[in-house]
């Protein structure tokens, strides 16, 4: 069975990103999947394009996508987030992206994240490195938590969940230069990969949120685990920690305490 190339994912992400860019200034049809978890017609348009293109070229591959769900397969697996940062998008905040990952036999091999507003294409291939618009990227050289800048996110059920992340946010905010919240897990991970942030953690996610970005961060030199320090950040109950090696242990210690 044919495997996709990194160029295949890059081309798909660029085309889906153009759908997002063209729809950005429109009045959006907003529907709610939860109290604060929304979806727009552009999410659906981007996902419909990606599903059609992948199924046409790789009809036997399994696809797990944010809006239509799908299935996980034992061998060839795609993870699709057609618009990561939908709340930003609906409010015309220009921080959002397309995220695509391909895995084979349980191992993520290719990841691409595209920010159409900044025209930034992040990509990685397992064992070969990570790139931003074709240039190699690397995590920061941060060695001390107090000199680091972190990023995080909060769950859509934050009003009701005990895993709402507020306590950890406070702990890290009082031990670092600051903690940001961009509203896109995929871009958070890519910004760690590019050395813009020194570390990222989040407690409640879905596989399509992080599959591509986690590979990009890891290939750029980040240590990527769940918040317990385990290797699996794609299975429930999902969580993730991605950090420059110099501060990973300090972040893990706080998350475990």
Image (spheres, helix red, strand yellow):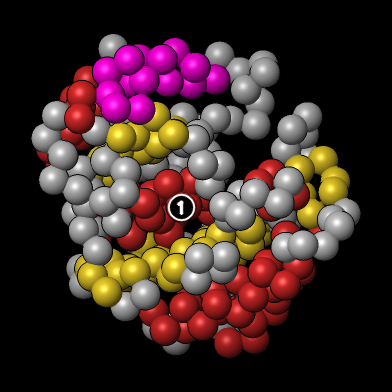
Residue nearer the viewer, 227 or 72? 227
The residue at the point 72 percent across, 72 percent down is: 22
| Residue 235 visible in the picture | yes
Q: Quadrant of residue 255?
A: top left
Task: Say which quadrant the N terminus sits in.
Answer: bottom left
Task: Say which quadrant the C terminus sits in.
Answer: top left
Residue nearer the viewer, 142 or 253? 142
Does residue 41 sit above or below 161 in this rendering?
A: below
The residue at the point 66 percent across, 26 percent down is: 157
Horizontal side, residue 194 vs residue 9: left or right: left
The residue identified by callout 1 is 187
Q: Secondary structure at mark 1?
A: helix
The residue at the point 39 percent across, 79 percent down is: 6
Q: Quadrant of residue 249?
A: top left
Q: Determine crowd level at label 1: few under 14, some 14-19, many 20+ residues with C-alpha closer than 10 A.
A: many
Picture coordinates of residue 214, whole percent (x, y): 36, 52
| Residue 86 visible in the picture | no
The residue at the point 82 percent across, 40 percent down is: 32
Q: Was residue 148 drawn as part of the magenta stretch in this picture?
A: no
Horizontal side, residue 181 vs residue 54: left or right: left
Q: Was residue 164 drawn as part of the magenta stretch in this picture?
A: yes
The magenta segment: 163-178
Does residue 193 sit above or below 145 in this rendering?
A: below
Picture coordinates of residue 229, whole percent (x, y): 26, 32
Picture coordinates of residue 205, whole percent (x, y): 52, 39
Does residue 94 sit above or below 122 in this rendering?
A: above
Picture coordinates of residue 68, whole percent (x, y): 72, 58
């Amino acid at each position: 069975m044919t495997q996709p190339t990194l160029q295949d994912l890059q081309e798909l992400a660029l085309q889906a990103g153009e759908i997002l860019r063209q729809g950005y200034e429109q009045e959006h049809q907003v529907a709610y999947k939860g109290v604060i978890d929304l979806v727009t017609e552009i999410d659906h348009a981007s996902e419909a394009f990606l599903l059609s293109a992948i199924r046409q070229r790789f009809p036997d591959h399994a696809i797990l996508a944010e809006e239509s769900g799908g299935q996980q397969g034992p061998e060839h697996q795609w993870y699709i987030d057609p618009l990561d940062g939908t709340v930003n998008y609906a409010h015309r905040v220009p921080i959002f992206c397309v995220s695509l990952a391909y895995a084979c036999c349980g191992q993520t091999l290719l990841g691409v994240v595209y920010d159409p507003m900044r025209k930034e294409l992040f990509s990685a291939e397992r064992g070969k490195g990570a790139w931003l618009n074709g240039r190699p990227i690397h995590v920061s050289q941060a060695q001390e938590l107090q000199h680091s800048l972190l990023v995080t996110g909060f769950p859509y059920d934050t009003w009701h969940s005990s895993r709402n992340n507020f306590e950890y946010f406070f702990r890290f905010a009082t031990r670092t230069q600051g903690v940001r919240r961009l509203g896109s897990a995929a871009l958070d991970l890519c910004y760690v990969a590019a050395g813009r942030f020194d570390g990222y953690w989040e407690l409640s996610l879905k596989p399509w949120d992080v599959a591509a970005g986690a590979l990009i961060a890891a290939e750029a030199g980040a240590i990527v685990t769940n918040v317990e320090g385990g290797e699996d950040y794609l299975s429930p109950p999902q969580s993730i920690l991605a950090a420059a090696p110099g501060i990973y242990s300090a972040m893990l210690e706080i998350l475990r305490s």
